[in-house]
Structures are given as C-alpha cells and as structure tokens.
Image (cartoon, helix red, strand yellow):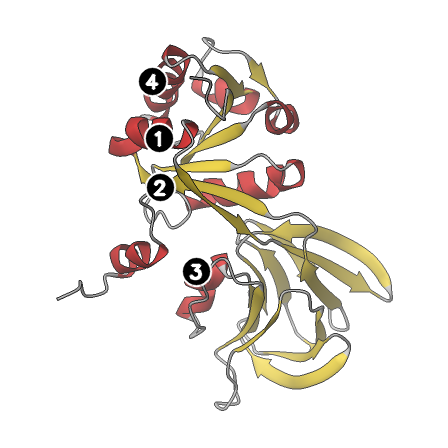
Amino acid sequence: MQTPFYTVGLVGKYNNQGMEASVRALGEFLRGRGHEVLLACQTAEHLGITDFPTCNLHDLATESDAVVVLGGDGTMLSIARELAAHGAPLIGINQGRLGFLTDITANDMYDAVAEILSGQYVAEERILLNGQVRRDGVRVFETTAFNDVVVGKGGSGRLIDLEIAIDSEFVYSQRADGLVVTTPTGSTAYALSAGGPIVHPTLEAVTVVPICPHTLSARSIVVSSHSRIELNLIYADDARVHFDGQIHFDLKSGDHVWITRASRPVTLLHPHSYSYYNTLRQKLHWGKKL
C-alpha cells in the first residue's frame, strides 16, 4: 500500500554520541520499507555518512514529505525555525535529555516512525514568533523563535527598566531581570521556571512572563497570538534579547523589541497514542492516576 509519506528527510545532531549509528540505521530501515531517504548535507558531512543522497536544509524541506529530527529539544528548535517556512511536518526522535518536542524515544523509533509514516499519527500545528529589534525607528535585527523571546540583563547583573505595550496600548512598566514572551510550546521551558502558566500547545495564545520583577504584584498575562507585543527598553547597563536561547542580539537603552506571530506554523507529527498530558506527567514528574 502506498504510504502518505514517501520521501523522508533525516537530520541528526552533530555531536551526539552514537548519532552516526542511529541515523544510518534509521535510514536503512526506511529504505527497506520502500521510502526514498534524503539526508541533510550538514548531518552527512559531520557524521561521515555517504550512503544516502544529500541536500541542504532548504531543499530537504521542499523535497521531503516529512522530516525526522534526531537529537534533543534544542536540535528540534533550530531545525523548526529553519524549515517552518517550507511546511514540511517534523517527527522528533529524542536523543537528548528532556524530550518535550522530540517525544519518541530512541528505543521506540522504528515502530513509531513506521506507524506515523503509514498514516497513523496525531498532527499538531505549533505557532512561532517573529521578533525584530528597532533602533531609532530602524529595524536592525529580525529572526524567529519557536519557544520564546527573552529580553534580559546581560553581564552586569543589574535590573533593566522596561515598558510593555500590546497592540500599541501601554500595559505596564517593569524593573526586573527581564521578560519572557513565549509561545504555548515554550510555556514549559524558561517561562515555566519564571512562574508562568502551562499553556496547551494548540492554543492561539502568547504569554508574557516577568523574570524576578522588582514589583512583587507583577504577574504573567496571556494574550491572543495575533497581538503585537512591544517591549521598550527604557534603561539598561547591559541587556540582550535571546531567541530560543540559541540566537541573541545586544540591546541599547531606547531600543524597541516587537514580537508578533510568525506567518507559518510548524507541524509536529506524533504516534497515534500521543498524549500531551502524559508527556507533562512524565517530564515534570507529576503523580500518576490513583
């Protein structure tokens, strides 16, 4: 029977122990099932794999029916940002530590991937954020984030002064270590550690979470994902804006950080038995059902 996904792209984290064997074995398994397998050229080069056709990430996304990402959540974050604009659905194999996004274990990857590629899966659309830095009215930096955009203090360790507006309406000013603006996907990351709520990943919402605010009454707020969140850096000795903890840009007093919903979501594919609440129980060590 013809499967819904014929051409499968593979991307693996470069410096993971045992990654070469995992990528090679999964590729052979998929080829044995009749799939065409494409390997990201960066993965092939770093892992020394020459058994499969290779292409860059852009072509991998456009030529693959689905892309399997082997690594941890950090790998999935970076690949999702790269491929989001092309619409290829992503399947995550966890070879990292936590595994909120890469929810299939290495031990289960053959059965789980075969199940998904045969058409038995749960698909979730996850929103991304677009962030831009404006200085003196000019856009000086722009990128996307899957988890969160964080404006925070730099090396000086001193609090920063911020003003927050939503859709050009002033909300509040804040002295704090910083502020996290997070997607529902990122609500279980830095924002959770800062006291933010867990937001179901399919909701069209964005959460604004203060980091160690000087005003103890400051609380997280949840707004529509279609809002424009504007952060005005009133004063800081040293400040940066971080995107998924992987990209950063140094800020100056007077800079504005505008955060909006990205135009294209990311689609994650899970096995048909996938449960977000079960993932929360496992990863956050919640009590089991009595």
Residue type marked 1? Glu
Q: Residues within 10 Å of mark 1 (few under 14, many from 20)?
A: some
Q: Quick check: marks 1 and 4 in contact, CB under 8 Å? A: no
Quadrant containing the C terminus in the rendered view? bottom left
Residue type marked 2? His
Q: Position of residue 243 (x, y in %)?
A: 59, 55
Badge number at residue 189 = 3
Q: Position of residue 123 (x, y in %)?
A: 47, 44
Q: Which callout, 1 or 2, points at the residue further toward the start of the chain? A: 1
Q: Quick check: marks 1 and 2 in contact, CB under 8 Å? A: yes
Between marks 4 and 3, how big is the CA–CA gap? 31 Å
Q: Which residue is mark 4?
A: 25
Quadrant containing the N terminus in the rendered view? top left
Q: Residues within 10 Å of mark 3 (few under 14, many from 20)?
A: some
Residue occupying image coordinates x 31% and y 44%: 273
Q: Residues within 10 Å of mark 4 (few under 14, many from 20)?
A: few
Q: Residues within 10 Å of mark 2 (few under 14, many from 20)?
A: some
Residue type marked 3? Ala
Q: Which callout, 3 or 2, points at the residue further toward the start of the chain? A: 3
Q: Position of residue 73 (x, y in %)?
A: 43, 45
Number of the front mark, 1 or 4: 1
Does 268 sit above or below residue 234? above
Badge number at residue 177 = none
Q: Which residue is mark 2?
A: 272
Q: Is residue 153 visible?
A: no
